[in-house]
Image (cartoon, rainbow, N blue to C red):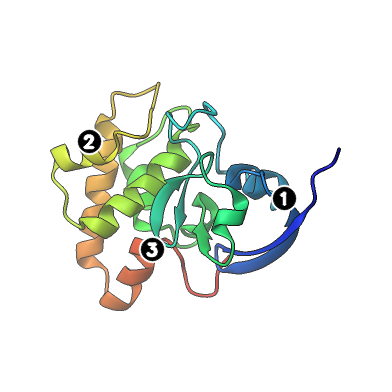
Amino acid sequence: MALEKTSVTITVNNDTYTRDIEPRQLLVHFLRDSLGLTGTHIGCDTSQCGACTVLLNGDPVKSCTVLTVQAADQEVTTVEGLGTIEELHPVQQGFWEQHGLQCGFCTPGVMITAVGLLKQNPQPTEAEIREGLEGVICRCTGYQNIVRAIQAAAEQFDATPAQTQAAATTGVTEGGE
């Protein structure tokens, strides 16, 4: 027996989408399968690894624990919505400059988590960064370069004009991509 479909409208990376979905569909599958945004990774299917982390109304959530219907009429930001090739988000720039990734599998979730952390605490200490990353597992690194990358992003926020700083902390650039 097929489940009845439900229509949802969600804004993802500044673009609004309306789709008919099964009510039990997880947000991570909506993003990957319906929208083709494969930067949001499926790592563990148990909400332990954080590879599926996205911003929901500016706050980090594990998209493997959110039903798509719960995100209806809300704003979602994925790693694809953080910046552009021409203008990286400060967190992306920090990862680039500080070599904050290895295999890259956890990187989208780490970056999104870092954006949420910097929104709450624009100048975190090393200990606060490590605590803020507790819900994201990186199996390749000892987190040293990830912490440095987030510290570099925090320094960029200090140098960012107020108008663009709001976009930097929400992860969404004007006009969307």
Q: From the image, tell me which residue sits under label 2.
A: 130
Residue 122: x percent and y percent?
21, 58
Q: CA distance from mark 3 to mark 2?
A: 20 Å
Residue visible at 19% across and 64% down?
Answer: 158
Residue visible at 30% across and 69% down?
Answer: 165
Q: CA distance from mark 1 to mark 2?
A: 33 Å
Residue 141: x percent and y percent?
34, 24
Q: Nearer the viewer, mark 1 or mark 2?
A: 1
Residue 89: x percent and y percent?
40, 58
Q: Report whether 85 appears left or right of 122.
A: right
The amino acid type found where label 3 is placed reads: Thr
Q: From the image, tell me which residue sits under label 3.
A: 170
The amino acid type found where label 2 is placed reads: Arg
SS at circle 1: helix
Q: Report whether 74 appears left or right of 167.
A: right
Tag 1–tag 2 contact (CB < 8 Å): no
In what quadrant of the picture does the N terminus appear? Answer: top right
Q: Nearer the viewer, mark 3 or mark 1?
A: 1
In what quadrant of the picture does the C terminus appear? Answer: bottom right
Is 44 situated above or below 5?
Answer: above
Q: Report whether 59 appears left or right of 128.
A: right
Q: From the image, tell me which residue sits under label 1.
A: 34
Q: CA distance from mark 3 to mark 1?
A: 23 Å
Residue visible at 55% across and 43% down?
Answer: 40
